[in-house]
Amino acid sequence: MQKSIFEKIIAREIPAQIIHETDELLAFRDINPQTPAHFLVIPKQRFDRLAEVPADRDALLGRLLLAAAEVARKEGLAGTGYRVVINNGADGGETVPHLHLHVLGGRPLGWPPG
Ligand code: 5GP
């Protein structure tokens, strides 16, 4: 299978502004930020989308969420708030086939999304 863009970032084959890393996940700034603060949290193991994560990897999903909250706090977003989004598949707006959490903040966000 061809490497996803995010696998290339994990492998340092393409550059990214990495802000957090563990042995199983990576957080880096989105190249096309939609809000003043916009970063992505990804597992190093590739799942093309949320729907493909097996039930026995539930703890990994929990750690991705906890990492999103930890990095948001370090980025100074905890007080004003932020949004965590997972786009799953075509209608969800997913463009990179590698599970990722968007963390968006730094300004008030509308709801529902368009
Ligand atoms: P999706 O639309 O799949 O939910 O989100 C993919 C995100 O990845 C988009 O917000 C897009 O800007 C970001 N992205 C795509 N390519 C790159 C890249 O090469 N580097 C970084 N840092 N972000 C990327």
Image (cartoon, grey):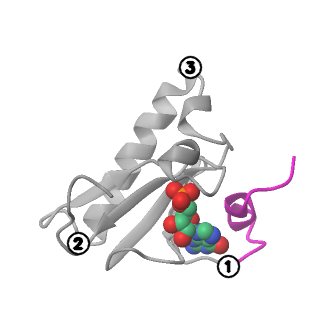
Answer few, some or many: residues within 10 Å of disc 1's Cα (few below 14, many 20 plus, some between 14 and 19): few
- Residue pictured at 44% horizontal, 47% vertical: 86
The x and y percentages for residue 5 are 71, 63
Looking at the rendered structure, the kind of residue marked 3 is Asp
Residue identifier under label 1? 15
Return the disc, 1 or 2, that comes first in the chain's sequence. Answer: 1
Between 111 and 27, the one nearer to me in the picture: 111
Q: Is residue 5 magenta?
A: yes
Between 88 and 44, the one nearer to me in the picture: 88
- Residue pictured at 23% horizontal, 72% vertical: 76
- Position of 14 compared to 106: left or right? right
Say which quadrant the C terminus sits in. bottom left
- Residue pictured at 64% horizontal, 57% vertical: 96
- What span is colored magenta in the figure? 1-14
**In the image, residue 51 above or below residue 72:** above
- Residue pictured at 81% horizontal, 56% vertical: 3
Q: Is residue 40 magenta?
A: no
Specify the label residue 56 is tagged with: 3
Residue identifier under label 2? 76
The x and y percentages for residue 81 are 17, 61
The x and y percentages for residue 92 are 48, 46
- Position of 85 compared to 6: left or right? left
Residue 21 in sight from this viewpoint = no
SS at mark 1 in the image: loop
Q: How far apart, in angstroms, are the residues tagged by discs 1 and 2?
A: 24 Å
The x and y percentages for residue 55 are 54, 19
Q: How far apart, in angstroms, are the residues tagged by discs 3 and 1?
A: 32 Å
The image quadrant in which ligand 1 is located: bottom right
On whether ligand 1 comes within 8 Å of the CB at mark 2, the answer is: no
Answer few, some or many: residues within 10 Å of disc 3's Cα (few below 14, many 20 plus, some between 14 and 19): few
Total marks shown come to: 3
Looking at the rendered structure, the kind of residue marked 2 is Gly
